[in-house]
Amino acid sequence: MKFRFSVVAAAMAMASSLAVAADDDYGFPDLDGFAATVIATPKELQPDLSIKGRPFRLRSLTVFPERPVSKYVWYHDKLRYLVFPQKGPAPLIFLIAGTGSSYHGPHMTTLYTAFYLAGFHVVGLPSPTSFPFMMTASSTMVPGVLDDDSRDLYRVMKMAWEQQLSKKLDVTDFYVTGYSLGGAQTGYLMMLDEQEKAFNFKKGLMINPPVSLYNSALLLDSYLRDNITTGTEAQLFWRQLMTAMGEEFANTQGAVNLGPDFLYKVYRNRRPNDQDLATLIGLAFAITAQNMVTVADVMTESGYIVPVGTTARITADVSDYFIVSARTPFRLYFKDLLVPYYQRSDPDITDDDLIQRASLYSIEEFLRTTDKVGVSHNVDDIIMKEGEIDWLVDVMGDRARIWPRGGHCGNMAYRDNVEHMLAFFGASLPEGR
């Protein structure tokens, strides 16, 4: 359930002295799960994934022609996705973004470039929990139930192939992978395709998937709400953050790139604690969840945040809506929006039913018996409840690669991880990369 750090990237100006290398042969820095999640992989530890020119194409689909386009979000009239085409015959791989993420972003860029350089046609899709997907391609517009969200993805994939890509690309085989929430959806997509066989996927890799979306979301909610409980604490935290950011920017020579290298450097200069880092991670997730709950409420006319029938001008003051949505954790989104939505069509459905459908537990038999699905995960992933990594190992067996550290997706761009990811699909980077 990857969440965006665009708002808090520079917040690692609160970080501490770099830990020494771990006593093992895995060369990713010996950071704890919180630090690794925020910092990610320094450039010097990544393979060379640079690409000359701009070999990608931006495509768009009208998924539900009958769905009216809101005048307030006219720019989301179609679902947009990204394609990296090869010039000749090649396998095609679909990439699924993490929670709230679009078809671009650091982790998607890692996946795009690695698979493109390895010789794949690459198609990148936004998460069903992202604003654009919810508006244009979600059948429910209340994401969070993995089977329904994955069916929405599968519909988009089939439309993209049948209407556009099949006319442009010479494809030898089909594959799929995704990270975080997109990783969990990869497992569902593989099962769907076994039933419908629109693509006959040869393999699918789940990268840092949550086992239970509900459990992981509650953990992420707690990182913010357990550490900041009053308005005074929030103001103090924000003031300290802004002060530290200003000092670090002032000490930086030249332009600042808010990427892993800068954050890694800052990590050596500051002294954070896990509470500070957890708060930042919780804040990033809260912003993603806030977008999701607001869009779901407005699109389904639930009246939870915005009163039903409200017609606002573009210049309207929406401060009250912003405040309410900011105070709505995933737990309440699930209880007050998602569950009631499903109960409108099936009054007998329960919270537990939907929690099960929002997890990999509901496809355990498929994951145990298929030889087409693998998983790449980290022992210290901060979105995983105790015992969930062990469950994955038990279910996946030798198809599970569990790294000793890396937090949540923090080591995705590390050279060993990229090599393993590509090798799972029988590929590799060109020599010298």
Image: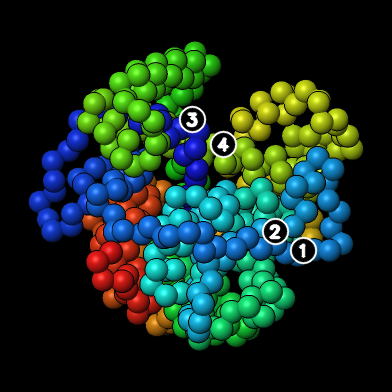
Q: Amino acid at mark 1?
A: Thr
Residue that mark 1 sits on: 62
Residue that mark 3 sits on: 225
Q: Residues within 10 Å of mark 2 (few under 14, many from 20)?
A: many
Q: Is residue 178 above or below residue 10?
A: below
State the separation of the CA atoms marked 3 and 4: 13 Å
Q: Position of residue 17 (x, y in %)?
A: 20, 30
**Which mark is in front, 1 or 3?**
1
Quadrant in the rendering for residue 353: bottom right
Counting residues from the start of the chain, the first of labels 4 and 1 encountered is 1
Q: Secondary structure at mark 3?
A: helix
State the separation of the CA atoms marked 4 and 2: 22 Å
Q: Depth check: 176 or 335 in front?
A: 176
Q: Secondary structure at mark 2?
A: strand
**Which mark is in front, 4 or 2?**
2
Q: Depth check: 282 or 361 in front?
A: 282
Residue that mark 2 sits on: 79
